[in-house]
């Protein structure tokens, strides 16, 4: 059985992928977004699919996401002061949380309930903050894998077993001391996720 031969359309796509960014068609740059554009073999018969698969994180994933601290704190304060809270997957008890979401880019959002239909001018929930470099229209598959997800970050439970401060305490203290960045570090696979938080 012989390997399939790339058709003219595939060959042209491969040629365009190998062009410098400023020489590619606008639609292709929009499609690539934040993908790293690894080299695709000239024999590829589905170059765009091969590019997505090559640029999607598999197995154990590690990433560090950077957020503006003032916006994270404002989002957390909204959750902390809300009268009612939405429940995430398998959550039984309503409590103030930040939801870390990966779909249109990746972002943190409050789980505090707002009036039905409350959206900003871009159609997004009002209490959310995107990671730096991963705003609306970006594709975070290269660092977070192919599946969309939502992970809950509890704001009012102790961060360690010694009954120390909460994530909300950490954000407030960091902002009061002049820090400007909140960093979310994640190590995860299909079965387990470990998160750590840093302020700078």
Image (spheres, grey):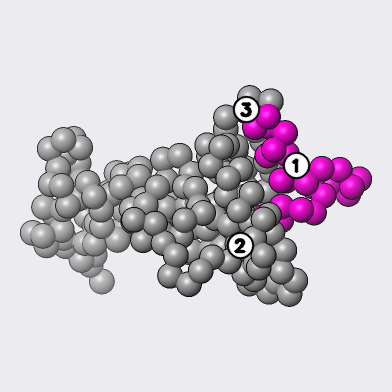
Q: Say which of 16 and 88 sits in front.
A: 88
> Residue 143: x percent and y percent?
48, 48
Q: Residue at x 54, y 65 (%)?
A: 114
First along the sequence among labels 3 and 2: 2
Furthest residue toward right: 162
Q: Is the residue under label 3 in contact with that under label 1 (CB below 8 Å)?
A: no
Residue 182 visible in this rendered orientation of the protein = yes
**Mark sitting on residue 195:** none
Q: Residue at x 39, y 57 (%)?
A: 120
Furthest residue toward top: 178
Q: Residues within 10 Å of mark 3 (few under 14, many from 20)?
A: some
Residue 192 visible in this rendered orientation of the protein = no
First along the sequence among labels 1 and 2: 2
Which residue corresponds to mark 1? 169
> Residue 188: x percent and y percent?
63, 54
* Image: magenta residue range: 151-176
The secondary structure type at the circle numbered 1 is helix
Task: Point out the image quarter for the N terminus.
Answer: bottom left
**Mark sitting on residue 112:** 2
Which residue corresponds to mark 3? 179
> Residue 179: x percent and y percent?
62, 27
Residue 184 as seen in the image, left or right of residue 147: right
> Residue 107: x percent and y percent?
50, 51
Cα distance between the residues tagged 3 and 2: 25 Å
Q: Say which of 183 and 176 sits in front.
A: 176
Q: Quadrant of residue 65?
A: top right
Q: Say which of 14 and 156 sits in front.
A: 156
Task: Point out the image quarter for the C terminus.
Answer: top right
First along the sequence among labels 1 and 3: 1
Q: Residues within 10 Å of mark 1 (few under 14, many from 20)?
A: some
Q: Is the residue under label 2 in contact with that under label 1 (CB below 8 Å)?
A: no
Q: Residue at x 54, y 55 (%)?
A: 109
């Amino acid at each position: 059985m012989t390997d399939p031969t790339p058709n003219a359309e595939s060959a042209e796509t491969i040629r365009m992928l190998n062009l410098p960014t400023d020489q590619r068609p606008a639609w292709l740059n929009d499609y690539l977004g934040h993908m790293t554009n690894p080299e695709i073999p000239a024999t590829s018969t589905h170059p765009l699919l091969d590019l997505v698969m090559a640029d999607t994180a598999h197995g154990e994933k590690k990433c560090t996401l950077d957020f503006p601290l003032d916006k994270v704190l404002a989002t957390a304060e909204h959750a902390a002061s809300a009268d009612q809270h939405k429940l995430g997957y398998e959550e039984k008890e309503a409590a103030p949380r930040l939801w870390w979401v990966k779909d249109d880019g990746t972002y943190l959002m409050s789980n505090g309930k707002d009036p039905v239909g409350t959206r900003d001018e871009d159609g997004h929930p009002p209490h959310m903050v995107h990671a730096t470099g991963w705003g609306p229209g970006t594709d975070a598959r290269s660092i977070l894998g192919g599946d969309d997800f939502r992970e809950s970050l509890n704001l009012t439970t102790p961060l360690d077993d010694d009954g120390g401060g909460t994530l909300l305490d950490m954000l407030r203290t960091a902002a009061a001391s002049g820090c400007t960045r909140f960093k979310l570090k994640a190590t995860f696979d299909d079965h387990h996720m470990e998160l750590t938080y840093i302020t700078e």
